[in-house]
Amino acid sequence: MRPQDLRNLMIGLLVVGFLAWGFSYITADREEFPGEMTYREGNYRLARGEYERALECFREVQKINPSYLPARLGEALVYIQTKDYEQARRILDQLIEEDPQFAEAWANRGILNDREGRFEEAMRDYEKALELKPELAKGPSFLYRLLHNIKEKPPTIADRLKYLQAELQKPPEERLLRVPEKDEKQGPLQTGWRF
């Protein structure tokens, strides 16, 4: 066997083993917190655009585990994706009020503000999210992108913050704050990978 073939075989076995481990972890019959499996299903449905089912899952988790804030965040993400911005804002504002350290709520409210054209508010929320949790600047991990078939690394809130800061320094007539074709391709909030 040629060294290149052996290398490819080893890489293939490593990938298959890693995927098998990941699948067994995901499907394991244990929950780290009450409602975890339903929460995971909600994230799965959200990522696939199955918004009604995702909303049902997140609400079910809230019944099982009312103190689990990421389930409420999931509900807000559904509302962002379905453009029910009023409901999304209500939930995000409540989450931030209840737990000012919940970085993902700040990040998602920043995205909501961004989508509504409230760019300066978006920047403040992005800054707060990154201050609370600097790793949000990294975006989704390679494994997350692999499992969700995301070929290119999507922009992060840190990328968007930097872009907005640069654009808002320009005269108003020179600013490019939205590119609808690109904006529409953005899936559920990219901080939404496992809270």
Image (cartoon, helix red, strand yellow):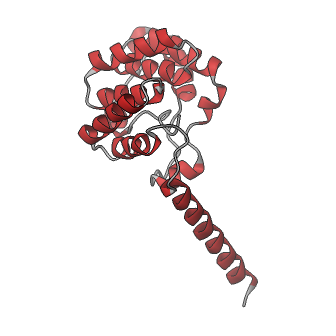
Which quadrant holds residue 132?
Answer: top right
Q: Is residue 76 left or right of residue 18?
A: left
Give the answer, above or below, for where 8 lies relative to 73: below
Where is residue 160 shown, x and y percent of the image?
51, 26
Q: How many marks?
A: 0
Where is residue 93 shown, x and y percent of the image?
41, 11
Question: Residue at coordinates 57% horizontally, 26% vertically from top-left?
Answer: 158
Which quadrant holds residue 113?
Answer: top left
Q: Is residue 142 left or right of residue 152?
A: right
Is residue 170 visible from the viewing direction of this image? no
Kindly give the residue lying farthest to the right in the view shown: 3
Q: Nearer the viewer, residue 116 or 32?
A: 32
Question: Residue at coordinates 42% horizontally, 25% vertically from top-left?
Answer: 66
Quadrant in which the N terminus is drawn: bottom right
Q: Is residue 93 left or right of residue 6?
A: left
Question: Residue at coordinates 30% horizontally, 43% vertically from top-left?
Answer: 49
Is residue 101 visible from the viewing direction of this image? yes
Question: Residue at coordinates 61% horizontally, 73% vertically from top-left?
Answer: 12
Give the answer, above or below, for where 40 lies relative to 108: below
Where is residue 172 shown, x and y percent of the image?
41, 9
Give the answer, above or below, for where 91 lies relative to 57: above
Q: Nearer the viewer, residue 158 or 192?
A: 192
Kindly give the residue lying farthest to the bottom in the view shown: 1
Where is residue 81 shown, x and y percent of the image?
31, 32
Q: Nearer the viewer, residue 82 or 165?
A: 82
